[in-house]
Each structure stands twice: as structure tokens, then as C-alpha cells.
Image: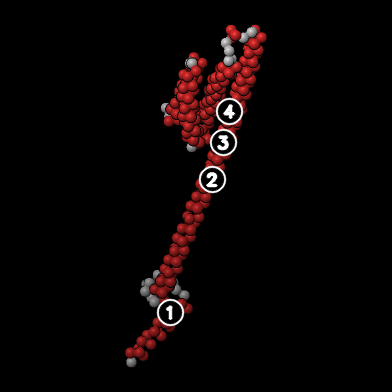
Amino acid sequence: MTELDEFDSNLNAELDKLQKEIDSLSKKDYNQKNAAIKKCQAQVKSISTLIESYQLEISNLDKVQSAKYNDSLRSINSRFQRLKSELEFKKNEGQTQENLFKGRSEQQPQRLEDMNRQQVIDMGDQMQKDAIDKLGGIISTVEKGNELADQINMELDKQIAQLDRMYDTVMDTQSVLKRSAKYIKYFARQVYTDKLLMCLIGLIFIAIIVLIVLSALGLDDGKFNTPDQVKGSLATDSSSTSNTTTTTGS
């Protein structure tokens, strides 16, 4: 199991724990429920941090590898948003009950036995109306939570698309760099070849000059045919040099 697979497994395990905690809220009394809600909120923050880390790890993968984990990330995000909405619903439900009981205590300064039938009916109607209003607020909150989840999914899709474009750009850049490196190597070989050719031509030229000089001076045993004009020129230069030396000696 790779590190990301283990990350995925841990996230799903944390979501399972959060689901169990939320399901158990309906079985608790008011005080226990408030404490359990705070615990669930702490779990939500922890899971949110894990999801961000998971998303960051996926962004560091290449396109082929990330495709496998992007589907899992979307599923985890969708489940996480649903659990957050459910927790918000439970929290608002508890607040509604608390406000309802407060309203009853404020609206019931006297006992039911002291009220007439019409007063009891009016009080029941008022309680029902308050409950319907609170329920409408809860439904509105759930709808907002669903809209927020849709927005998060859309934003996540945009980020994934942006990562895909960045990956394509990086791959194109790498391809251009590879072609540039090949061209540089090619030009470098051409430069080295030109230098070697220049050196070889220089050596050939020097060798020809040496052979001509040796042939003109008669030091090549007649193996190299030198034109008479070149021999005469070299002989004249040699004679002039000898005469100059003799004169100087005298």
C-alpha cells in the first residue's frame, strides 16, 4: 500500500467515526448533545486539514497517477460536505428545541390546569407555528449547505483542470528543453569537427612546406620532385646567405 492509499484509508476511517458520532446525537439528552456536537466540530476541523494535505499530495503527482486519486478525493469531499450539513442540521435542531422550550417557559407563566380550552389551543397553535418557522430555517440552512458543497465541488474541478493544464505546460517545456539539448550537442560536435579539420589542414600545409624545403636543399635523396624555379630560388637565397656570412667574417 502506497502512502496515498494509506492516506485515503485514514480519511475514510475518520469519516466513518464522524458518521457514527452524528448518528448518536439523536440518542443523547440536551447537555450530552451539546458536548457531542463540539466533539464532532473538532473532528470536522481535523478532517478538513487532512483533506487539504491529501489534495496537496495529489497535486504533486503526474497526470496519469493523479487521475486515480482525483475520483477518490471528489468522493471524500462529497461525503465530508454531506456530513458537515448533517451536523449543522443537528446543531440547529438542538438550538431550535432550546429556543422552543424558552418560548414555552416565557409564554406559560401559569400552569395548564389554570388555562381554559381556548388558551391551550392558542398556545398549541403558537408552538406549532414557531416549530414550522424553525423547521423552515433548518431547511434553508441545509439548502445553503448543499449549495456550498456544490460550489466546493466546482472549485475543486477547476483546480484539477488547472493542475492538468500546468502538467501539460511542464511536459511541453520538457520536450522543448530536450530538443534544445540535442541541437546544442549537434552544434558542439560541428564546432569540434571544424577545429579538427583546421588543425589537420595546418599540419598538412606545414608538412608540404617542410618537404619542399628538404627537396630543394637536396636532403630528400631525390624522392620528392621540386620545380626548378623553387630550387633556384632556394639556391639563390642559400648562396646569398653564404656570401653574406663570408663577407661578415672577412
Q: Which numbered tag is attached to residue 149? A: 4
Q: Amino acid at mark 1?
A: Leu
Q: Which residue is mark 3?
A: 159
Mark 2, other Cα within 10 Å: few <14 / some 14–19 / many ≥20: few
Q: Which residue is mark 1?
A: 234
Tag 3 secondary structure: helix
Inter-mark Cα distance, 4 to 3: 15 Å
Of badges 1 and 2, the one in the foreground is: 2
Of badges 3 and 2, the one in the foreground is: 3
Q: Amino acid at mark 2?
A: Thr
Q: Earlier in the sequence, mark 3 or mark 2?
A: 3
Of badges 4 and 3, the one in the foreground is: 4
In which quadrant of the rendered view does residue 214 lie?
A: bottom left
- Side of 128 where 185 appears, left or right: left
Q: Are marks 4 and 3 in contact (CB under 8 Å)?
A: no
Residue 17 visible in the current orientation:
yes
Q: Amino acid at mark 4?
A: Ala
State the residue in front, 183 or 164.
Answer: 164
Mark 4, other Cα within 10 Å: few <14 / some 14–19 / many ≥20: many
Inter-mark Cα distance, 2 to 4: 36 Å
Q: Earlier in the sequence, mark 3 or mark 1?
A: 3
Mark 1, other Cα within 10 Å: few <14 / some 14–19 / many ≥20: some
Q: Amino acid at mark 3?
A: Gln
Inter-mark Cα distance, 3 to 2: 21 Å
Q: Which numbered tag is attached to residue 173? A: 2
Q: Position of residue 191 (x, y in %)?
A: 48, 58
Q: Earlier in the sequence, mark 2 or mark 4?
A: 4
Tag 1 secondary structure: helix
Q: Are marks 3 and 1 in contact (CB under 8 Å)?
A: no
Quarter of the image for the N terminus: give it. Answer: top left
At 61% from the left and 27% from the top, the residue drawn is: 144
Q: Earlier in the sequence, mark 1 or mark 2?
A: 2
